[in-house]
């Protein structure tokens, strides 16, 4: 088993104590930080999801795998976040009402921060009103990021985007959406400005917005 396979296996089975050391060992062996993230952790979470779907594991196992991944991400964070340029913008980001998934959102925040944005993390299970009041009360905010991981919380994303679209402050911010069940078609349908598939493309899109502004 290669070191990165060992890492992926440890994430899958939720070995929180082993994972940070294995991430470091992968880096020491010359794996690039993004490769460690993608092959050693994100792919492992996909396996976890598959096993959950097939009733081979249950919510507690999914939770401990998530905790293990978070520990690993902490080691990678300084490497992936890079040196921040001067501040290029300010945005908020949250996972929609009813949805507790935050690993993807946190990665998106980390990558966007690396471009120079100040990102206010609204957290998980964020009520529609919280997105709206936060952006309305801070004129510096030019982007609102909305994440959803469940097909059952896609309606909450629709509601959030609808409320943001109805805001009197709408002309000064863009709405970015993403998350595993979200598609460009859905983003267009609900009136979001930007859909991106992963953290790296979300960061590119946010940076492009700041350049245009
Ligand atoms: Co949940 N869960 N979960 N879960 N969980 C999924 C999402 C699921 C696909 C598993 C499965 O069945 N195969 C499934 C959803 C099925 C569906 O909706 N069709 C599911 C389910 C069913 C559930 C529960 C309902 C289970 C239950 O209780 N019966 C429950 C719901 C709780 C709730 O939210 N109300 C639940 C609970 C949990 C845990 C709490 C145990 C845990 C989350 C812990 C945490 O996040 N702190 C958990 C986990 C870990 C998963 C899986 C295994 C992994 C998710 C993850 O972190 N992936 C997941 C299976 C899977 O994803 N294949 C699953 C890694 C992460 C890096 O990817 O989040 O997709 P992701 O983020 C990506 C992109 O989506 C994108 O960029 C990120 C980085 O590249 N992205 C954006 C995300 N947000 C973005 C925003 C953007 C742009 C891009 O712009 C703003």
Image (cartoon, grey):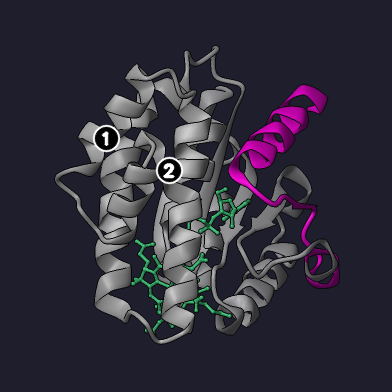
Question: Secondary structure beneath disc 2?
Answer: helix
Residue 118 visible in the current orientation: no
- Dot 2 and dot 1 residues touching (CB under 8 Å): yes
Residue farthest to the left, as pictured: 17
Please tell me the numbered disc located at residue 123.
Answer: none
- Residue 142 position within the rendered picture, expressed as x and y whole percent measured from the top left: 66, 40
Residue drawn at x 55%, y 19% as measured from the top left = 87
Residue drawn at x 52%, y 42% as measured from the top left = 38
Q: Tell me the residue that label 2 is attached to.
A: 40
Q: Tell me the residue that label 1 is attached to.
A: 22
Earlier in the chain: of badge 2 and badge 1, it is 1
- Residue 71 position within the rendered picture, expressed as x and y whole percent measured from the top left: 25, 43
Residue farthest to the front, as pictured: 1
As for residue 198 lying within the magenta part, the answer is yes
Depth check, front residue: 104 or 64:
64
* Quadrant including the C terminus: top right
**Whether residue 144 is situated above or below residue 159 in the rendered picture:** above
Does the beta carbon of the residue at mark 1 sit less than 8 Å from ligand 1? no
Question: Secondary structure beneath disc 1?
Answer: helix
Q: Please state the total of marks drawn on the protein image.
A: 2
**Whether residue 123 is situated above or below residue 24 in the rendered picture:** below
Q: Name which quarter of the figure residue 36 lies in.
A: top left
Question: Magenta span covers which residues?
Answer: 187-213
Does the beta carbon of the residue at mark 2 sit less than 8 Å from ligand 1? no
Direction from residue 154 to residue 74 in the image, left or right: left
Q: Name which quarter of the figure residue 190 lies in.
A: bottom right
Residue 141 visible in the current orientation: yes
As for residue 29 lying within the magenta part, the answer is no
């Amino acid at each position: 088993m290669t070191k990165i396979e060992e890492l992926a296996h440890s994430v899958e089975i939720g070995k929180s104590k082993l994972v940070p050391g294995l991430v470091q060992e992968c880096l020491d062996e010359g794996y690039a930080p993004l490769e460690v993230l993608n092959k050693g952790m994100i792919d492992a979470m996909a396996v976890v999801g598959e096993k959950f779907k097939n009733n081979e594991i249950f919510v507690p196992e999914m939770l401990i795998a998530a905790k293990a991944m978070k520990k690993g991400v902490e080691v990678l964070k300084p490497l992936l976040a890079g040196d921040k340029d001067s501040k290029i913008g300010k945005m908020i980001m949250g996972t929609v009402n009813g949805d507790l998934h935050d690993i993807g959102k946190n990665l998106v925040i980390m990558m966007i921060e690396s471009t120079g944005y100040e990102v206010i993390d609204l957290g998980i299970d964020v009520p529609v009103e919280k997105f709206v009041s936060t952006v309305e009360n801070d004129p510096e905010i030019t982007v609102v990021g909305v994440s959803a991981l469940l097909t059952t919380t896609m309606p909450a994303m629709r509601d959030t985007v609808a409320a943001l679209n109805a805001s009197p402050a709408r002309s000064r911010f863009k709405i970015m959406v993403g998350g595993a069940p979200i598609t460009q078609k859905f983003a267009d349908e609900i009136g979001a400005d930007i859909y991106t598939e992963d953290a790296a493309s979300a960061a590119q899109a946010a940076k492009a917005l700041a350049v245009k502004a």
